[in-house]
Amino acid sequence: LGRHTNDHMTSFNMKTPSGFDVEYGWGARTVDDATWQVVRHEKGSIWGHRPVPQPAATS
């Protein structure tokens, strides 16, 4: 769980039963193309988005 720096979206990531990653997010800011300005972000998250260790695979 965390919040993106660029779009201010709160989101979380999960792994599906078939093994691929999915990110769900909500609350992103709306972009107005008439007034939007390009900005360089130095980090990906305002808070959160720290990886959780995965359990060891079992045979």
Image (cartoon, helix red, strand yellow):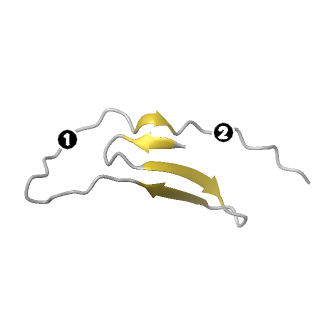
Residue 39 position in % (x across, y down) = 19, 41
| Badge 2 or badge 1: first in the primary sequence | 1
Query: In this picture, is 11 found above or below 34?
Result: above
Q: Residues within 10 Å of mark 1 (few under 14, many from 20)?
A: few
Provide the secondary structure element on which disc 1 rests. Answer: loop
| Quarter of the image where the N terminus is located | top right
Farthest residue to the front: give it: 27
Check residue 52 in the rendering and tell me which mark sits there, or answer none.
2
Check residue 39 in the rendering and tell me which mark sits there, or answer none.
1
Residue 10 position in % (x across, y down) = 45, 47
Q: In the picture provided, is 37 more to the left or to the right than 21?
A: left
| Tag 2 and tag 1, C-beta contact below 8 Å | no
| Quarter of the image where the C terminus is located | bottom right
Q: In the picture provided, is 41 more to the left or to the right than 45?
A: left
Dot 1 amino acid type = Val
Give the alpha-carbon distance from disc 2 to disc 1, as whole Å. 29 Å
Provide the secondary structure element on which disc 2 rests. Answer: loop
Q: In the picture provided, is 14 more to the left or to the right than 11?
A: right
Residue 49 position in % (x across, y down) = 52, 39
Farthest residue to the right: give it: 59
In this view, the residue in front, 55 or 14, is 14
Farthest residue to the left: give it: 34
Dot 2 amino acid type = Val
Query: In this picture, is 35 found above or below 20?
Result: above
Q: Image point 57% across, 51% down: which residue?
A: 13
Q: Image point 8% across, 58% down: which residue?
A: 34
In this view, the residue in front, 18 or 4, is 4
